[in-house]
Amino acid sequence: MQSEFEEPSNSEIVLAPRARILLLAGRIGEPSVVSWCEELLKGAVAHNDRRRPSITWLGGRHGAAPPYQDYWPRVWAARGLLYVWRPSAESAVLAGLRDPAWRVREMCAKIARRHALHRAEPLLTHLLDDRVPRVRAAAEAALTESARSPE
């Protein structure tokens, strides 16, 4: 069964993640991309679901070359939320801050920083003790930014 969504072209798949995500949002609408990223991040949809765009839109060439670690689609989905956003995605990001994969936690902390997610503060505080230095640094940066921005 073929997907109803076009794959990125050879010239599109090598674009920077932000450019690919914004290009897809221009084609199918930002709300659709945000919803897809939310679903992927929560594990509500598989990365290879033919009813959704190709994971290569989020993961680029890396997404085209499975097998890769099972957490990468969640990382790529979270990264997508850095560039396209709707408040409805907040619950997916909060869940991602508890993800067993450190790369997902790190990316979700970056989202919390970019979008000033004050509800994430308790989870970010907990991540200050994460075993992975990059997660701790992302959590600290998010909390610092949150202290600067009004609620």
Image (spheres, helix red, strand yellow):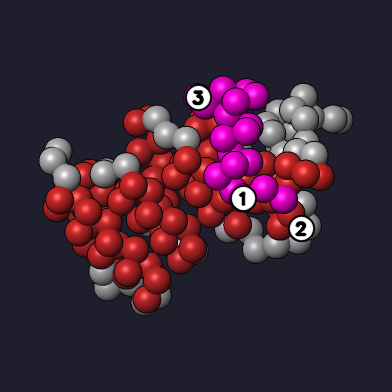
Q: Which disc is residue 45 wearing?
A: none
Name the secondary structure under disc 1: loop
| Residue 58 vs residue 88, the one in the foreground | 58
What percent of the width, then of the height, locates residue 122?
20, 54
Choose mark 3 or mark 1, whichever is in front. Answer: 1
What percent of the width, then of the height, locates residue 113?
30, 51
Figure quadrant of the N terminus: top right
Determine if residue 38 is in view: no
**Residue carrying label 2:** 66
Choose mark 2 or mark 1, whichever is in front. Answer: 1
What percent of the width, then of the height, locates residue 127?
29, 65
Residue under the image location 37 percent in, 67 percent down: 135
Is residue 13 toward the left or the right of residue 134 in the image?
A: right
Choose mark 2 or mark 3, whichever is in front. Answer: 3
Image quadrant of residue 27?
top right
Query: Which is nearer the N-term, disc 3 or disc 1?
Result: 1
**Residue carrying label 3:** 31
Q: Residue 83: say if magenta.
A: no
**Residue carrying label 1:** 16
Residue under the image location 75 percent in, 38 percent down: 8
Task: Give the amino acid at mark 3.
Answer: Pro
Task: Give the amino acid at mark 2.
Answer: Pro
Query: Which is nearer the N-term, disc 2 or disc 3?
Result: 3
Q: Which residues are magenta?
A: 14-32
**Mark 3–mark 1 CB contact (< 8 Å):** no
Name the secondary structure under disc 2: loop
What percent of the width, then of the height, locates residue 22?
57, 35
Figure quadrant of the C terminus: top left
Disc 2 from disc 3: Cα separation: 27 Å
Q: Main secondary structure of the magenta part?
A: helix
Residues packed near mark 2 inside 10 Å, few (<14), some (14 to 19) or many (20 plus): few
Is residue 147 toward the left or the right of residue 3 in the image?
A: left
